[in-house]
Amino acid sequence: FRKEISMRNMLIDAQTSHLVGHINKHKANVEILLTNPVGIGEHQDIQTAIEEELEEIANYHDKLEMLVKYFPKTTESNSEEK
């Protein structure tokens, strides 16, 4: 039974890391666009590029919120109560 809790929590941790990593990637992209828009030759419409990055952040943020809300990590004491 302890193995199931450990595997479940490991999967939750992995998904959390995955989502946070994507959020951080897109946040970095927004920071680059905000601080050095001239250096980004392919993005002639900086506002659109920023909006696209914000959409990605919102997407991963929503997924992270759902993971935390609906799939909380389980402790051994919590599982014994159920």
Image (tube, rainbow, N blue to C red):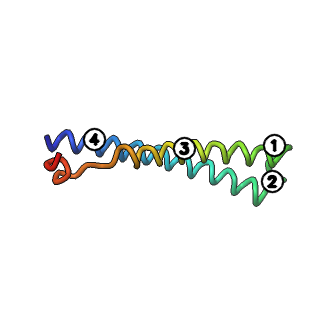
Residue of label 3: 60
Q: Residue 43: which numbered mark, if any?
A: 1
Badge nearest the viewer, 3 or 1 = 3
Q: CA distance from mark 2 to mark 4?
A: 42 Å
Residue that label 2 marks: 37
Q: CA distance from mark 4 to mark 3?
A: 20 Å
Residue in the image at 69% along x and 57% along y: 31
* Horizontal and vertical percent position of residue 81: 15, 50
Say which of marks 1 and 4 sits in front: 4
Dot 1 or dot 2, earlier in sequence: 2
* Residue at the (29%, 45%) spot, across then down: 9
CB under 8 Å between discs 1 and 2 = yes
Residue at left offset 68%, top offset 45%: 53
CB contact under 8 Å: marks 3 and 1: no
In the image, residue 66 sits, relative to residue 75, either above or below, namely above
Question: Dot 4: few (<14), some (14–19), or many (≥20) neighbours within 10 Å?
Answer: some
User: Which of marks 1 and 3 precedes in the sequence?
Assistant: 1
Q: Which mark is residue 58?
A: none
What residue sits right under mark 4 in the picture?
A: 8
Q: Label 2 amino acid?
A: Pro
Name the residue type under label 4: Arg
Local SS, label 3: helix
